[in-house]
Image (tube, rainbow, N blue to C red):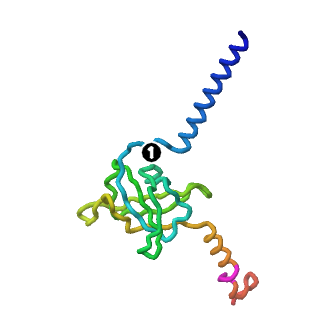
Amino acid sequence: MQSKKNEIWVGAFVLIALAAIIFLCLKVADIRSFGNQPTYRLYASFSNIGSLKVRSPVKVGGVVIGRVGKIWLDKKANYTPKVELDIFTQYDDIPNSSVLSIRTSGLLGEQYLALEIGPSGEELGISTMKDGDSFERTNSALVLEDLIGQFLYKDKGGSENQDKPTSAPGQAH
């Protein structure tokens, strides 16, 4: 009888643990964004996409408004990286003057697309983006290794103080 009771407790514990693992997997994969939420497609070209990946979020002020749907090299445009964005249809009033930038969450976090909403209005001649439109203004990813290399190069060879004569305090040149 005691053995049967222990088996029931072990079985219940295993089921709860399995449910917790499935919950965590779904949470990490962010499955809710796969849902049947309708989207429309926008496109963007970048000179460098860094480590941007398919399913990376598209955010406005930290709010996710879509996901990266596809990334490829455009052979017709000298192998320029192109990105296809799946934007949720509830955000269908993005002005075509907006700027799309590749940013990083934290210092070494994942990369995402940050959308900076530009001015809008028919009186300014600015319309909203429609399905299939492309962003005219984009900012590519800042690659940490390139920034470090530029800093080291400036420090070694291009220092402005290298050519100036030094003088003691209080002395005029």
Q: Residue furthest bottom?
A: 173
Q: The residue tagged with tag 1: helix, strand or loop?
A: helix
Vertical arrangement, residue 170 with respect to residue 32, above or below: below
Q: Is residue 78 left or right of residue 106?
A: left
Vertical arrangement, residue 133 with respect to residue 7, above or below: below
Q: Is residue 145 left or right of residue 35?
A: right
Q: Amino acid at mark 1?
A: Phe
The percent coordinates of residue 86 (x first, y second) are 40, 54
Residue for badge 1 = 34
Vertical arrangement, residue 131 with respect to residue 90, above or below: below
Residue 94 highlighted magenta (yes or no): no
Quarter placement of the N terminus: top right
- Say which residue appears at 47% left-offset and 51% top-offset: 62
Please tell me which residue lies in front, 103 or 119.
103
The percent coordinates of residue 128 (x first, y second) are 30, 59
- Say which residue appears at 73% left-offset and 85% top-offset: 166
The percent coordinates of residue 20 (x first, y second) are 59, 32
Q: Residue furthest top?
A: 1
Please tell me which residue lies in front, 70 or 32.
70
- Say which residue appears at 28% left-offset and 62% top-offset: 127
Please tell me which residue lies in front, 116 or 44.
44
Q: Residue furthest right?
A: 168
Quarter placement of the C terminus: bottom right
Please give the range of residues in magenta: 156-161
Number of residues whose C-alpha sits closer than 10 Å to that of mark 1, classed few (under 14), some (14–19) or many (20 or more):
few
Q: How many marks?
A: 1
- Say which residue appears at 36% left-offset and 57% top-offset: 41
Please tell me which residue lies in front, 168 or 15.
15
